[in-house]
Amino acid sequence: MRNPLIRLQCGVNSYEWGKVGKDSAAAKFAAATPSDFSIQEEKPYAELWMGTHPSLPSKDLETQRTLNDLVQENQALLSSSIAERYENKLPFLFKVLSINKALSIQAHPNKKLAEQLHANDPRNYPDDNHKPEMTIAVTPFDGLCGFRPLAEITHFLQTVPAFRKLVGEDEAKNFENAVKDRETSDKEEDKQANKKALQSAFTKLMNTDKDSLESASKELVESAKSQGSQFASNGGPSNNGKELADLVVRLNSQFPGDIGLFVQFFLNYVKLEVGEAMFLKADDIHAYLSGDIIECMASSDNVVRAGFTPKFKDVDYLTKMLTYSYAPIN
């Protein structure tokens, strides 16, 4: 006999970065299920969660029992092999995110690192699991994802003075010399040398002191406002100068003087139309900026953050854990 479908009541987190009221897809999807939930027009709704994760477990609409309780008691809901492998827990977590303000510069640790972080700091890293994730846009979306092609990073080092100042003249030259003529090489030794140079330059930026960041941020925003379409010499290969300038101004209005204003010159700027998708491995750097998306990920709430956030930042771990893979977004 087949199990009947279970209609779930899914919780919604209200964070400051979420879309407000009925503009939030997370809120609208939650309200579609009969319950005592009602949308408050002045309240931001950020995330709807569907799964067994203890931070916000879904419930059986009829009985109000958690989905975790149901799968613990009935292995047929998972299949015996999945139940055995994942200790009677749902191995994935489904979310709807409604983003009105940039989320943090972040990455999710791989399985081994997640276990280490959780053991050492369970308050900031509540899970011992990895968190690869895939994202599908349900409204137009933009974000930062993965490191840019190396030629683009070189272009920005040469055309955005404030960016070069924070990376440092010596570090910028070392990067340019290291990757020159082998930006797209398929040789493994070249790839490893490129990644090493990229990690060094990125780590230098992320450890910028407060006074230098404040001064460079003002210079960057003034340049973006005054140069417009000519910002960064029209953005360089495959980039739009006005789009980049507008992004600097927009992000600065949300997080004034944040290191994330400069991280964007290392990362791909991604736009997704409705129905388009992207995939992130564990240890891939990213930051979601705006839009409504559906995510499916391994069941974990571990996030290593280093910018665009008032929350705990862990620059040391972030700069060490990243894949430093560099490529355009396809």
Image (cartoon, rainbow, N blue to C red):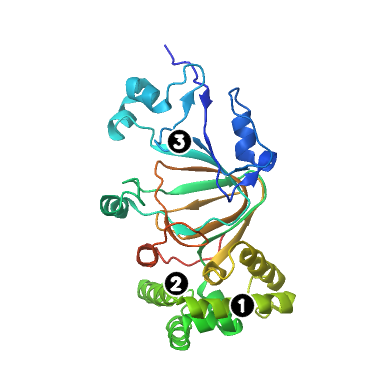
In the image, taking residue 273 as reference, residue 105 lies left or right, namely left
Callout 1 amino acid? Lys
Residue 128's spot in the image, x, y percent? 31, 46
Image: 49 above or below 237: above
Image: 120 above or below 173: above
Let me know if residue 275 appears in the view.
no
- Tell me the quarter of the picture where residue 107 sits: bottom left
Q: Nearer the viewer, mark 1 or mark 2?
A: 1
* Residue at the image position 34 percent from the left and 49 percent from the top: 123
Q: Residues within 10 Å of mark 1 (few under 14, many from 20)?
A: some
* Residue at the image position 43 percent from the left and 84 percent from the top: 171
* Pointer 2 residue: 206
Let me know if residue 273 appears in the view.
yes
Callout 3 amino acid? Leu
Residues at discs 3 and 1 in contact (Cβ within 8 Å) = no
In the image, taking residue 64 as reference, residue 290 lies left or right, namely right
The image's mark for residue 218 is 1
Image: 84 above or below 138: above
Residue 149's spot in the image, x, y percent? 52, 71
User: Which SS class for mark 3?
Assistant: loop
Which of 294 and 150 lies nearest the eye of the viewer?
Answer: 294
- Tell me the quarter of the picture where residue 158 sits: bottom right
Measure the C-alpha gap from mark 3 to mark 1: 40 Å
Measure the C-alpha gap from mark 1 to mark 2: 17 Å
- The residue lying furthest to the top in this view is 1
Q: Earlier in the sequence, mark 1 or mark 2?
A: 2
Callout 2 amino acid? Met
* Pointer 3 residue: 56
* Residue at the image position 62 percent from the left and 64 percent from the top: 251
Residue 173's spot in the image, x, y percent? 46, 87
Measure the C-alpha gap from mark 2 to mark 3: 32 Å
